[in-house]
Amino acid sequence: MNLAIDCQGLVKRFGSYTAVRGVSFQLPAGAIMGFVGPNGAGKTTLIRMLCGVLVPTEGKATVLGYNVLTQSEEIKQRIGYMSQKFSLYDDLTVKENLDFYAGVYSLHGKTAQEQKARVIERIGLTERTTQLVSALSGGWKQRVALACALLHSPQLLILDEPTAGVDPVSRRIFLDLIHQLAKEGITILVSTHYMDEAATCDYLGFVFYGRLIAFGSPDEMREKEAKDSLDDLFIYYVENEALDDPRNQAFKKGGRG
């Protein structure tokens, strides 16, 4: 199996606080995986380790065949990353933002022009290139951020809560774009709060207080535990996971009902 991500026992500590606790999973190339979990669950920390931005305290992982401990620069060159804040410059136009990110990815001359033209058409930005980003709606900013992340033709696209605060229509358009990109061979890792988004992923990872408490395809996970919805499934795993974190005691005391 050709793996885009092979993660084995990743741990990240900040002083005495453990943000990620022994996470392991494998993601085949070309698949879409969703990380689902509440704020503070450790999703962003885990993503930053896989991007080569944070160094794991323990464990190991390869991303696109490169070691996160020793080959972080090679990883950064081959992934596209989109944060929930979009990381755009409001006082620049759409085209100027693309120009800036082309420079960040060391794209110049004819190559830069071709890549910018490709993503502008691919993401549907042709009529927006001269607009200031500050004048765009959240849905259009989302698309510009995606275009910037795709400029250098990454093999892996990592999206950290990309649809947070975006209207339902824009969310649907964005999800359709993501699935089209996956069909073109790009591996996608996305963190989300929305179970309807999670249901469309090939694989799901439920993250709770730094642990990966469940992993698998949505259908397999629902069938295994005989749950009708992903909401019920997530709550089931949370209530049954023996976590050491004292913040989980409320779930333990509440029981399943």
Image (spheres, rainbow, N blue to C red):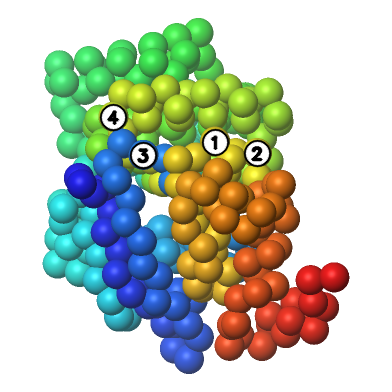
Residue 63 position, x and y percent, is 24, 54
Dots 4, 3 in contact, CB < 8 A = no
Find numbered disc 2 in the image and state the secondary structure of the residue it sits on: helix
The image quadrant of residue 10 is bottom left
Give the distance between the C-alpha atoms of the residues marked 1 and 2, in whole angstroms.
Answer: 7 Å
Residue at image mark 3:
31
Give the distance between the C-alpha atoms of the residues marked 2 and 4, in whole angstroms.
Answer: 23 Å
Q: Amino acid at mark 2?
A: Asp
Residue at 65 percent of width and 69 percent of height = 238
Residue at image mark 4:
185
**Which badge, 1 or 3, comes first in the chain's sequence?**
3
Give the distance between the C-alpha atoms of the residues marked 4 and 3, in whole angstroms.
Answer: 8 Å
Kindly give the residue lying farthest to the top in the view shown: 127
Q: Amino acid at mark 3?
A: Ala
Quarter of the picture holding the C terminus:
bottom right
Residue 196: mark in rendering:
2
**Image depth: mark 4 or mark 1 in front:** 1
